[in-house]
Amino acid sequence: MCELKNRFIALLLAVFILVASSGIGSAAETIVHSGESIQAAVNNASEGDTILVELGTYSEDIQVETPNLILKSKSGNPDYTILNGEIRIIDAAIPVSTEINGFTIQGFGIISIGFAGCTAKNCKIMNCSMGMNAAMDSSVVAENCQFIKCGTGMAGGHLTCVRAENCHFIDCGVAMSPGTGPDDYYYSKNNVEIRTDDSGKQVAIPIPDYPAEPEPTPTPTPVETPEPTPVEPSEPTPVPTPAETPASTPTETPVETPVEPEPSPVETPVDSGGSSSSGGSSHRSSSGGSGGTGGSPENQRNVAHKDTTKVFVPNGKTVTFNFTNDVTVVECITFESEKTVGKITAIAEDLKNKSTLVSKLPEGEVYKSFNIWVGNAGYGDSNSISNATITFKVEKSWLNEMNLDPVFIVLYKYDDKNKTWIEIPAIINNEDDQFFYFTAEVPGFSSFAIGNSNNSLLASKGNSQLASEPTGKFVNGEVRSAGNSTVTGGTEKESPGFGIISGVVGLLGMIIYKRI
């Protein structure tokens, strides 16, 4: 009996060990075949999984919110696995780190947003306004990659990390543009910038390693000490020889040596495809017209113009972000912050069509769709800010073409929660020969549209009934929903006097009847 009991316990222990060990190393590997969706595999992946992508060309945008995901081409050769789209790495309440390995990514590049990081290995990133972009609080790392014909190869915003090692930046406007704040991290090692001149010849310019290499400390100090002792006693005997040698030999040799090595690093030809480039070759740039270092969830194919600006945001004070490059409809934004958040980035984006983040446009004529993003992780559209305003402009030529009075211009903000547009009144504050300038109080910053009021067309026709569309209205700091109702003339209310008199008369009649 005792032996049977021991065997039973041993069997239980074995089963327990088997079950416990089955959870170890549970990371899965998924294969995406040609013609299938990479995003579908990403959506079904768990933390630590590897997605292998077979040869082919894939045209889609990819958004990754799963931690420690590895996205890898099956061949390992970027020429055989091509992605036409944007890769967005976004933190979904938890930090996200992603590795992209062995792809050609063309058109839209890689962006990490929030507490997220992306490492690209053995990739070709081509024809992008920004090859790899680190928005606030994020990082981008490139190893053994080629950035070809990008406006900016790698860029970083506030509180970001930009790191590159063994990379080539070929015919890019700017190779690396890291954040310039004291808390931003920048690392560069063994990177080369390659430019094609007008004759088609390629010239390689090494990018200085940063931080400064720790090599100068171990200089050949110990080698110098043994030299004077053995050399000096043997030299004094041949006195006539040193007198003749310095006259001819040392004068010619040192002059030739420093001249020759200088041109060699500047004119190193490199075999790599590409045509003539445009732009300067500096490695740092400020935020400006069509670029920017902040993060935007908008599909970058839909962005016509972009402007960015940075301001320190303290607690309880009104701050103003001025967009001075004059490339979007937004002139400036203001708000008060409930907390001190430091120096943050605001982004204004004019869009080619309606935002990819909204379901449809508001009713009526729409002048322009645009986005405004402030800070990170939804900060600009949260309870952390108050008293927010937007100053924007509308072309007079468009108003004349639409036969609209500027007093009917309103601002629409998209309410992502209710999937509807909020109509916000706008006040004319200025005008010039080309534009009317408006200011509107907004409940936050996200996707917007400028258009005519839902009631303006009816009002212009002299209709006294103002039909309201299924949009909300932002009035005195509150969002009020508006139903499909009409405002008509007042209806008569029934006077309660007649009913009261009838009741009293009836009661008196009953009393008299009982007494009789």
Image: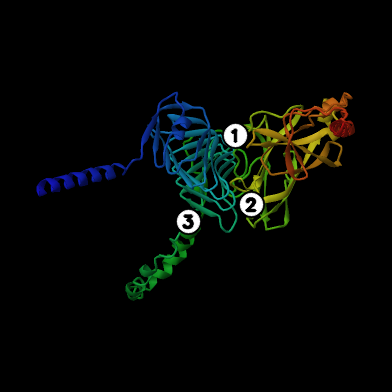
Residue 69 is situated, as x and y percent measured from the top left of the image, at 43, 40
The kind of residue tagged 2 is: Ile
Residue 1 is situated, as x and y percent measured from the top left of the image, at 10, 47
The residue positioned farthest toward the front in the image shown: 516
Dot 1 or dot 3: first in sequence order is: 3
Q: Which residue is mark 2?
A: 344
In this picture, residue 498 sits left or right of residue 68 = right
Q: Residue at x 43, y 60 (%)?
A: 215
Viewer-side label of 2, 3 = 2
Disc assigned to residue 257: 3
Please state, as top left, top right, bottom left or bottom right, where the C terminus lies in the image.
Answer: top right
Residue 505 is situated, as x and y percent measured from the top left of the image, at 89, 32
Q: Are marks 2 and 3 in contact (CB under 8 Å)?
A: no
Dot 1 or dot 2: first in sequence order is: 1
Q: Which residue is mark 1?
A: 299
Q: Are marks 1 and 2 in contact (CB under 8 Å)?
A: no
Front residue (pair 494, 97): 494
Name the secondary structure under disc 1.
loop
In this picture, residue 489 sits left or right of residue 50 = right
Q: Are marks 1 and 3 in contact (CB under 8 Å)?
A: no
